[in-house]
Image: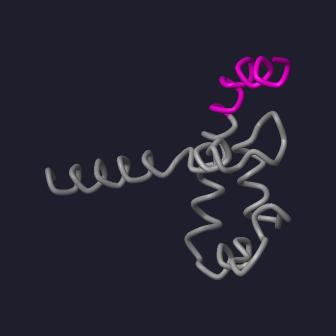
Amino acid sequence: MRERIARILALGVLLCTLTGCGTLFGRAASSTSGPDYYRGTAHDFGLLFGSERLNRGYFPATLWCWASVACPILTLYSLPADIVVDTVALPYDIYQVHN
């Protein structure tokens, strides 16, 4: 019983650490091009459906994402957390754009 609870807890911790990846990548200092609002959500959609910003050069991110089975699943899993974080950060984004 304890072993099963430990496995469920470990899986829950792993899944929680994977949420919000689009927000981290979308708000990185190197990603200044792109939309001013909802950057993490835009990064997730760009990764899933193709984006010129993500698919430049020798590394087509969308192709590699779909080639690995886990990437689209984790991106879809992360999408709700990215939407929530982007909504919470919206006042700061508006302030940054207008100043």
Give the residue displayed 57% in from the left and 44% down from the top.
20
What is the residue that sits farthest to the left in this orientation? 2
Q: Nearer the viewer, residue 20 or 55?
A: 55
Q: Quadrant of residue 86?
A: top right
Q: How many marks?
A: 0
Quarter of the figure that contains the C terminus: top right
Q: Nearer the viewer, residue 50 or 28?
A: 28
Q: Position of residue 2 (x, y in %)?
A: 14, 50
Q: Nearer the viewer, residue 10 or 26?
A: 26
Q: From the viewer's perspective, is 29 left or right of 39?
A: left
Give the residue displayed 76% in from the left and 23% down from the top.
96
Q: Indicate whether residue 96 is drawn in magenta.
A: yes
Above or below for 66 versus 26: below
Above or below for 65 versus 78: below
Q: Position of residue 28 (x, y in %)?
A: 62, 45
Report the span colored magenta.
84-99
Q: From the viewer's perspective, is 18 left or right of 61?
A: left
Q: Position of residue 37 (x, y in %)?
A: 80, 33
Above or below for 67 versus 83: below
Q: Position of residue 66 (x, y in %)?
A: 68, 76
Give the residue displayed 85% in from the left and 65% down from the top.
52
Q: Quadrant of residue 35?
A: top right
Q: From the viewer's perspective, is 12 left or right of 45?
A: left
Q: Indicate whether residue 9 is drawn in magenta.
A: no
Q: Main secondary structure of the magenta part?
A: helix
Give the residue displayed 73% in from the left and 52% down from the top.
43
